[in-house]
Amino acid sequence: LCAALLLYIYVKFNASLILRRRWCQSTQEKVKPREPNVQIYEERNKTRTESLQYEEIPRNLRFYISSVLFLVRDSVLVFRVLYLIFSITGVFLSMSTFFGPFFFSFHLLGVITRSELLKYVIKSVTQNGKSILLTVVLALVIIYIYAIFGFIFFRNKFSISDEELFCESMLECFITVVNYGLRSGGG
């Protein structure tokens, strides 16, 4: 009920502002002139942007489809809709199964929307995702090199008990080095 109320209030007070801002941005985007005479282009473009105010945009099927797409691209609205969906799913699954708390755990992400510092952390991880992924790939390559040395020179040392050997193949040796190496802090 509370999540539905939050979604309603957000849509009631912000949806028209979001649509107005996005429509104004999309109508003010200038197209590069194809004609050699720039003055004619500027005169046409002036009349086009002056005549395309938000109130004057024709309310046809294209307008409504574009408006829905503009709203779907708003991250706060998407978060609020997911908030409501996870609330309803959690309530109904709590009555019949034990999976309800899983869906209620999504609400803990609301802390991110209230803290500027956490917003910066999420922004830094998402904007630098490619470099973080490449760093993980580099780490796996280095671990693979260590696994090769372990496979060639220290294969007999990869046993936890006297009977089991965890380095019989190169793949098994790599998985063992990744598993035990990362869990024991690399050492």
Image: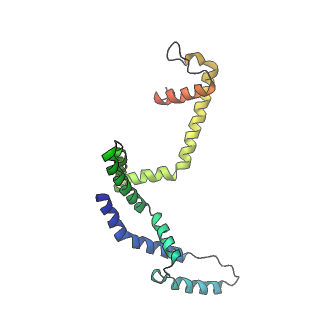
Number of labels in the image equals 0
Can you name the residue that lies furthest to the front here? 96
Can you name the residue that lies furthest to the left here? 2
Give the x, y percent position of residue 120.
42, 53
The residue drawn where x is 66% and y is 79% is 33
The residue drawn where x is 48% and y is 73% is 64
Seen from the viewer's position, the closer of residues 24 and 46 is 24
The residue drawn where x is 37% and y is 69% is 14
Seen from the viewer's position, the closer of residues 120 and 97 is 97
Q: Is residue 184 above or below residue 138?
A: above
Q: Quadrant of residue 48?
A: bottom right
Give the x, y percent position of residue 110.
35, 53
| Left or right of 116 on screen, residue 68 | right
Seen from the viewer's position, the closer of residues 48 and 71 is 71
Give the x, y percent position of residue 109.
37, 51
Q: Is residue 120 above or below residue 99?
A: below
Q: For the N terminus, which image quadrant? A: bottom left
Q: Quadrant of residue 7?
A: bottom left
